[in-house]
Amino acid sequence: MKHLLSINDLTKTEALDILNLSLEMQKVNSRDVKKLPALTGRTVANLFFEDSTRTRISFELAAKRLSADVINFTAKGSSISKGESLKDTVQTLEAMGVEALIVRHNYSGAANTIANSKWSKASVINAGDGTHEHPTQALLDALTIRQRIFGRDNLNDLSGLRVLIVGDILHSRVARSNILLLRTLGATVAVCGPATLIPEGIENLCDFVFYNLDEALGADFDAVMMLRIQAERMNSAFMPNAAEYSSGWGLGDSRFSKLNSKTLILHPGPMNRGLEISSAAADSEQSAILDQVTNGVAVRMAVLYKLLAQEQSNG
Ligand code: CP
């Protein structure tokens, strides 16, 4: 495995290998000295053309915990403002000896473009590209669901689990990567949202499509993943207004009070509290939202280890 651009790059065995290696990384992260020497002398660059809190910081922490040198590049404050191209930016990092490029971009396909170019020999990890994919988010979500429902040390796939993804499916790279990975791991996946935010043909990708959230929640899912409304990707009105969205498709206090107390609540963040999820739901014991953040570090350590340390030892 040279790059991680899409969940489609992973077989079920490879995905499970990453989840299971993440358990070992969790053990490192719970020690007093949270460090492995695996990537000593290796250089990793966070190449972020779009804003991020969780993904950028957790990749930085993951690389540092594996002892890599880390460069943080953000478009703001770089020579992009002077007209520098993606190619020149990547070639500049290549000239400095960067061996892994962790790429976030608002262009769907940016990570693939870099990986398929001759601009760099680095491994490329897609850290979220437009509305396309966010593979490490899906991996950390799968790990979180498995641990919270099956137990911390469970090594199995997700067969038998039923997951509902709710909200702005149309613009969500998180939804796409999650649908692909959860189904690869054996889970049943449904989506729910207003018709304007459900992409055409989604029924070919997932198991069920709901347009009414109360009907969907009545079907009693093991986990419900609420998605952020991606206003920055909407160039016209996809919903009447925030209040109507919240009342139709938000996990507000009233819906939360009726939710099965065993149903796990997820959200990839950043959250719009009061729009797609209420504080009562987000901060409840049923919520795994901060577990998702914690697991992001371990999963990204596992991915960096697989791409850089294991590939090197495989020759
Ligand atoms: N979930 C996620 O990608 O969050 P950030 O945009 O903060 O990285």
Image: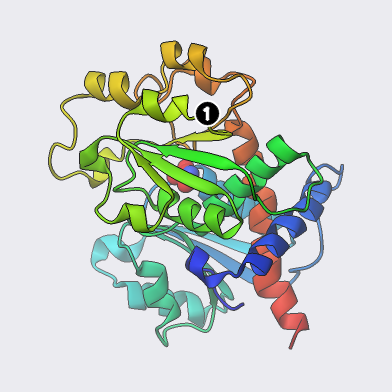
Residue shown at the point (87%, 42%) measured from the top left: 32
Left or right, 55 with reference to 197: right
Against 203, residue 101 (above or below) is below
Mark 1, other Cα within 10 Å: few <14 / some 14–19 / many ≥20: some
- Residue 77, horizontal then vertical, whole percent: 36, 54
Q: Which residue is at 48% across, 16% downward?
A: 256
In the image, 260 versus 254, the foreground residue is 260
- Observer able to see residue 49: no
Residue 299: x %, y % from top left: 66, 54
In depth, the one of 123 and 146 nearer the eye is 146
Residue 42, position in %: x, y? 68, 72
The amino acid pointed to by label 1 is Asp
User: Where is residue 119, by image quadrant?
Assistant: bottom left
In this picture, residue 241 sits left or right of residue 98 = left
The residue that mark 1 highlights is 220
Residue 294 drawn above or below residue 282: below
Whether residue 271 sits left or right of residue 60 in the image: it is left
Q: Residue furthest left?
A: 236
Give the secondary structure at mark 1.
loop
Q: Is residue 194 above or below residue 277?
A: below
The picture places residue 21, in percent across and down from the top left corner, at 76, 59
Regarding residue 48, the answer to whether it shows in the image is yes
Q: Is mark 1 within 8 Å of ligand 1?
A: no
